[in-house]
Image: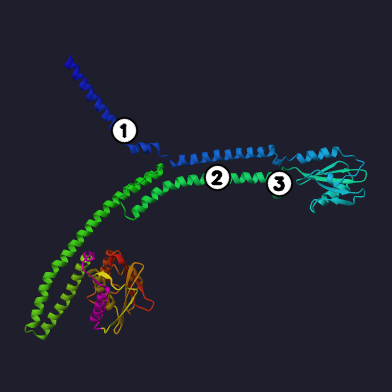
Amino acid sequence: MRQHSKRNEKQNMKQDSKQNEKRAAKQPPKSDIKWNMNKEIRLKRFFIIFLTHTILSLVFVGLLWTCLLFAASYSGVTIPANAVEHSLSVWIATLDGHRAVAPEEVPEGVSYAFFDTNNVLLQTNFDEKTLPTAVKLAASNGQGITKRAGTLIYFCFNTDTQRVVVAYRLMARFASPLMRRLFPNAELFFFLLLFIMLAVDLVLIASGYARKLNRELQKLASAAEEIRQQNLDFNPQRTRLFEFNRIMDSLDRLKTDLNRSLKEQWATEQQKKQQLAALAHDIKTPLSIVTGNAELLLESGQTEEQQEYTAFILEHAGQIHHYVTGIIELFRSSHLCGSGNRCQLEELLLEAIQNVESLGNKKRLSCILTTACLPDHLQVPKDALRRIFDNLIDNAVEYSPKDGTVFLHASAAEHMLRLSIRDEGEGFSKEALSLATAEFYRADQSRGSKTHFGLGLAIAKQITEELNGTLCLENAPEGGALVTVCIPLTCC
């Protein structure tokens, strides 16, 4: 019996543990729990909440304004609209029709005009716009006549020696003389205050919800910007809006597909480059054999026609060799940008001058070097800058006219080394300014030489970018093409 009970306890413990594991598996992770606390909503509900909030807020502002209005009235800040009418009625009731009325007796806020029995004006505080109405009312010779003209209420009464016309406005006023002078109509002031309060309330609510919506939009914009910059190793941040999350899911799928596509494209491109580099390298061996045998044929006894054919073979074999060498240099240029050997910049500049004069010997080219703000000792990556100079000089010599000049300039400023080379040729076309650094691009197929294959500027740009620098193409104001290379001095 004891053994049987122990077995049952063990089985129950196992079942309880399995049930606990299942419950733990069903429970969402902490991040999901946190997300459920901020459950996503649809845009329709978002705008309904915004509208409801706006209506309630406007109602609250209206109630607050009403409270302010009553508080101002009960505290004596404002005088009610019928206060002047009441004080005027009380004053008129106390008058004796047999004695003359003095202006200082007239209650505050009441305009007056005193006439004699012949309707001649004696004294008044009416303005020019309201006085004619008072004169007409006095000329009617009526007693206790009331007339309304716009916002003014006129009242006329007589004494034995006078005809008096008074006028007042049925509107609330401020008790303070300063406020009354600034805002004669207290009602208009409070209505203006209500308008300002409603406007401020609407602006605050709209800007608050706009910030909320903008925060969610920024998550989409941030994800799109990461994809645009090809930074595909990020996790999109979820929003609180259902429709935005559907867009975020689409961006996430786009990111994944683009990442996979770029990796496949990069692998394919690298494979093609390796195959092309290997092919170019394999071509050099049989090409060297062809060139060597053709040179041996020249040394053997050949007829004039045979020598012409052999020279033709050597010339085109040289073109193929130059082309193959350019392709190999293009694919191994990134290996030149390591630490490598270093030398003084002056050595490379002098070497560049000699290269210009040597390559441009047939065109009788000259070279002018200028420098500015260069340090006394500037160590530079020798192999990398030499390849940049060689390709830029080759391009400048190619497009320079006979008896022309190639200008070299070197300067250092703002932690950057600036190198430029200018020729006196025709300069870059509009198309060449945007495409000249592309591989195998040649602006004019008929004008270029048979040894120029459109690789020089592409190689120079690739090496410059490996040095974290920039290569800029432009047409110089003096004429000719101008190529400028800027590299950080930290690379030097």
Is residue 356 found inside the magenta-colored segment of the image? yes
Label 3 neighbourhood size at 10 Å, few (<14), some (14-19), many (20+)?
A: some
The residue labelled by disc 1 is 27
- What amino acid does circle 1 point to? Gln
Q: Residue at x 53, y 45 (%)?
A: 204
The residue labelled by disc 2 is 202
- What amino acid does circle 3 point to? Asn
Q: Position of residue 425 (x, y in %)?
A: 32, 79
C-alpha separation, residue under disc 3 versus residue under disc 2: 26 Å
Q: Looking at the rendering, in which quadrant would you find the C terminus? A: bottom left
Q: Is residue 76 visible?
A: yes
Label 2 neighbourhood size at 10 Å, few (<14), some (14-19), many (20+)?
A: some
Q: Of all residues shown, which one is farthest toward the top?
A: 1
C-alpha separation, residue under disc 3 versus residue under disc 1: 67 Å
Query: As rendered, which of 109 and 475 lies closer to the eye?
Result: 109
**Magenta part of the chain:** 334-362
Q: Is residue 454 visible?
A: no
The image's colour scheme reads rainbow
Q: Position of residue 367 (x, y in %)?
A: 29, 81
The residue labelled by disc 3 is 185
The first of marks 3 and 2 along the sequence is: 3
Closer to us: mark 3 or mark 2? Answer: 3
Q: Main secondary structure of the magenta part?
A: helix
Label 1 neighbourhood size at 10 Å, few (<14), some (14-19), many (20+)?
A: few
- Residue 477 position by quadrant: bottom left
